[in-house]
Amino acid sequence: MPSDVLAGGAGFDLTGKRIWVAGHRGMVGAALVRRLQSESCEVLTAGRGDVDLLRQDQTESWLAKNKPDVVIVAAAKVGGILANDTYPADFLYQNLMIEANVIEASRQAGVGKMLFLGSSCIYPKLAPQPIQEDSLLTGPLEPTNEWYAIAKIAGIKLAQSYRKQYGCDYISAMPTNLYGPEDNFDLQSSHVLPALLRKAHEAKLRGDAELTIWGTGTPRREFLHVDDCADGLVHLLKTYSGFEHVNIGSGEDVTILELAQTVCEVVGFEGSIVKDTSKPDGTPRKLMSADRLRAMGWTPKIGLKDGIAQTYQWFLANRA
Ligand code: GFB
């Protein structure tokens, strides 16, 4: 067990704590709010009308007034490979502003514990697999998402610097590619899994013979259901207080073609899968080592096919 894991019963107790989930309308924030219902804590949320996290003055005022005990930074500008590649300024600027504003205002408001959420794209494009936490900053980033990655690396460094300079108990987690309820199903800006679910569903309804996937289908990706992610994050909050960030993943990956085949099975689309190689592949493989979090006693529960089936049901009920 890593030395900075809080020992057994002496972990961080959430009972009675006021926990602000910044970004509660996003997929991860919403999952965190659901997960925290089973803890004896008070969950605080704030919509964009209450506080615009891009504005320093608003963020500072909101935190000074509401004074949470714990802050989880799940607010971020996120998107799939095409959105990242098309809007580099938005991804860099907005993420830098959100994390800088929330972390500094948390310090000013005396927030005792902060959990910052990053992403597996922080690692070098050709990092050895499965990717260990100490691969950070050992090589060049994947160009399609380096803007988002730089912002998220800055967030990790902010948390570390506040721990070093001010002694704040600020920690960071790096979730892998996530999916689940409340995901973005817009075909231009979404990640691959919701995009394929929607494409397969619509192709089935139209009776199409083919479904088109972007790129070569050979890149490998790891997927984690967002409810597993939220559970892992709460586990981390309760048990971890350390300088290094911690990966949150399933420990298994598939090719994009295999993913598309599983999605088609779940949806019941029986046509063929064709490739649009004018679209980017992105990083060839992104499988994170799950060893550190497993050593802290946490493992995911939702298998990929079951998770896709559950997400498809959510899509049918809420978006289709
Ligand atoms: O999920 P995704 O957009 O992002 O794409 P990344 C993963 C892979 O799926 C790429 C392929 O190889 C895509 O070319 N793909 C196939 C598709 N069909 C589709 C489709 O219809 N839509 C999409 N979106 N992809 C993102 C980063 O990288 O991952 C972010 O850009 C972030 O910064 C996020 O880290 C988790 O996995 O390549």
Image (tube, rainbow, N blue to C red):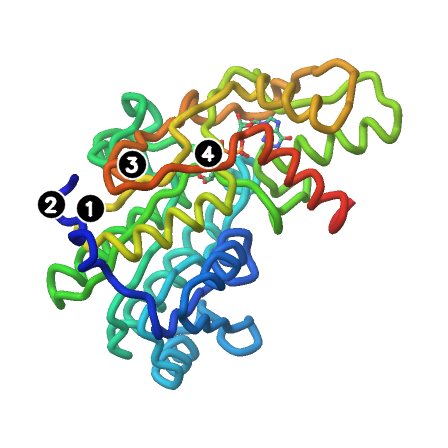
- Looking at the image, residue 140 sits to the left or right of residue 40; the answer is left
Q: Of the residues tagged 3 and 1, which is closer to the observer?
A: 3
**Which badge, 2 or 3, comes first in the chain's sequence?**
2
- Give the image location of residue 50, x and y in percent: 53, 78
> Which of the two labelled residues, at mark 3 and mark 4, occupies the earlier sequence position?
4
Q: Eyeballing the image, is 16 above or below 113?
A: below
Secondary structure found at label 4? helix
Query: Between marks 2 and 1, how big is the CA–CA gap?
Result: 11 Å
Mark 3 vs ligand 1: CB under 8 Å?
no
Name the residue type under label 2: Ser
Q: Residue at x 45, y 69 (%)?
A: 53
Q: Is mark 4 within 8 Å of ligand 1?
A: yes
State the image coordinates of residue 7 (x, y, percent, origin top left). Answer: 16, 52
83 left or right, relative to 205: left
Q: Nearer the viewer, residue 26 or 310?
A: 310
Image quarter of the C terminus: top right
The residues tagged by marks 2 and 3 sit, at their Cα atoms, a distance apart of 14 Å
Badge 3 element: helix
What whole-number distance in Å separates the C-alpha atoms at marks 3 and 4? 30 Å
Residue 121 visible in rendering: no
**Residue 185 relative to residue 220: left or right:** right
User: Which one is nearer the viewer's eye here, 230 or 299?
Assistant: 299
Q: Which residue is mark 1?
A: 244
Residue 25 higher or lower than 153, as above or below? below
For the point 72% across and 36% down, the residue is 198
Residue name at image x 29 percent, y 57 percent: 238
Camera-side mark, 4 or 1: 1
Quickly name the residue at label 2: 3
Which residue carries the number 4 mark?
Answer: 144
Q: Which residue is mark 3?
A: 294
Amino acid at circle 4: Thr
